[in-house]
Image (cartoon, rainbow, N blue to C red):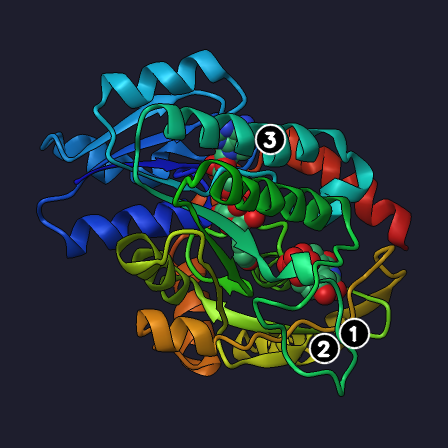
Amino acid sequence: MKLLVTGGCGFIGTNFIYHMLAKYPDLSIVNLDKLTYAGNRANLAPLEKKNDGRYSFVRADITDAEAMARILKQHAIEAVVNFAAESHVDRSISDPAPFITTNVNGAQVLLHAAMEAGIQRYVHVSTDEVYGSLSQDDPAFREDTPLAPNSPYSASKASADLIVRSYYKTFGYPAVITRCSNNYGPWQFPEKLIPLMFKLASEDKPLPVYGDGLNVRDWIFVTDHCLGVELALLKGRPGGIYNFGGNAEKTNLDVVQTILRALGKPDDLLTFVSDRPGHDKRYAMDYTLAADELGFAPQYDFETGLAETLAWYQSHRDWISSIESGDYRQFMNDWYGERK
Ligand code: NAD
Ligand code: TYD
């Protein structure tokens, strides 16, 4: 199969490309990425070096309709997985516009090009954040939980989900939507909670926890998300929507304290800062449907996944410094400057 992966130079896309190429010897992948601040082509350098015809990279923007049509045709693409997105909630608060451009317009442009090209396998990668926020006693999100996004990021993802749904209902285009909880693992950009806290703790700098630190996220090791997307690609029902979760609901305080202990750093590095506006209290996933229809089950428990993740970051300190751009430093200074 000839698969187009968009956003493959980001965190989950990188893991997905390695996961799929290792598992399916007959698969070849074209990785299409705009290389925003979050995209790092060097993540896949070993595959480029191999030069065995199974992996290639194209720099392009999913909002560019002409380029999408041309690339799908030129590479005789048979299936598409769309990971390309602006993905950081805090950035969506400080500057929402790029989130609408890529996550809504870009998602539609790519979807439309794939439909026009007659591609019958299409996975749109979405997030649990489209469902909004749970209180402690609410049942976990199901696929039929009403969409109630609270941040510009989650609103842009929910918008794209509705567009994908409309392409199935109106045109019969058999796209599949996946919604996953918070990922962690190798190659995650150090603006997200776990790699950021690793980086700051390693530098003996304060670890900024928003609000009271009692917000809850369900954490899934990234290769378990990759497994879910793989199953959705191969076995997903046309028009299907599938939740994936990691069975690991944790408060942010819990996660940050676990990281400090694992690194042998003192608890007093933990610093409470002013809350993220519109901060969702709790996410939790009911993935019964994916278990029943796709045979999905996460393989990692949080303790094992976190230990593996921290070990990866410890042995890849040069990776963190290599991706710290001026843009990254500027955002971090401005955002955390406002939270003191
Ligand atoms: P990321 O920010 O690490 O990577 C995004 C990638 O998309 C980057 O390589 C970037 O260069 C590329 N990109 C951005 N705009 C583009 C455009 N216009 N055209 C082409 N490429 C573009 O994000 P991630 O954490 O790997 O997330 C990937 C996908 O998974 C996103 O759609 C996100 O909404 C979804 N998701 C993420 C999580 C999570 O915990 N990280 C959870 C559930 C779903
Ligand atoms: P994040 O990794 O940004 O993922 P998301 O907002 O998509 O869930 O944040 C995870 C949780 O950690 C979220 O509740 C916000 C919190 N958080 C902090 O407390 N401090 C931080 O510096 C960051 C980046 C996140």
Residue 239 at x, y percent in the picture: 44, 52
Label 3 is placed on what type of residue? Thr
Q: Secondary structure at mark 1?
A: loop
Residue at the image point whose x is 81% and y is 49% from the top: 336
Give the label on residue 213, or none.
1
Q: How many angstroms separate mark 2 from mark 3 (CA)?
A: 32 Å
Whether disc 1's CB lies below 8 Å from ligand 2 is answered yes
Q: Secondary structure at mark 2?
A: helix
Q: Disc 2 or 3, which lies upstream in sequence?
A: 3
Q: Are the residues at dot 1 and dot 2 in contact (C-beta closer than 8 Å)? A: yes
Q: Is residue 338 visible?
A: yes
Residue at the image point whose x is 49% and y is 22% from the top: 61
Residue at the image point whose x is 63% and y is 62% from the top: 197
Q: How many angstroms separate mark 1 from mark 2 (CA)?
A: 5 Å
Crowding around mark 3 (Cα neighbors within 10 Å: few <14, some 14 to 19, many 20+) is many
In this rendering, the answer to whether 11 lies above or below 4 is: below
Q: Are the residues at dot 2 and dot 3 in contact (C-beta closer than 8 Å)? A: no
Q: Is residue 113 left or right of residue 250?
A: left
Q: Secondary structure at mark 3?
A: helix
Quarter-wise, where is residue 314 in the image?
bottom left
Q: How many angstroms separate mark 3 from mark 1 (CA)?
A: 31 Å
In this rendering, the answer to whether 3 lies above or below 282 is: above
Q: Is residue 75 left or right of residue 202?
A: left
Q: Is residue 198 left or right of residue 206?
A: left
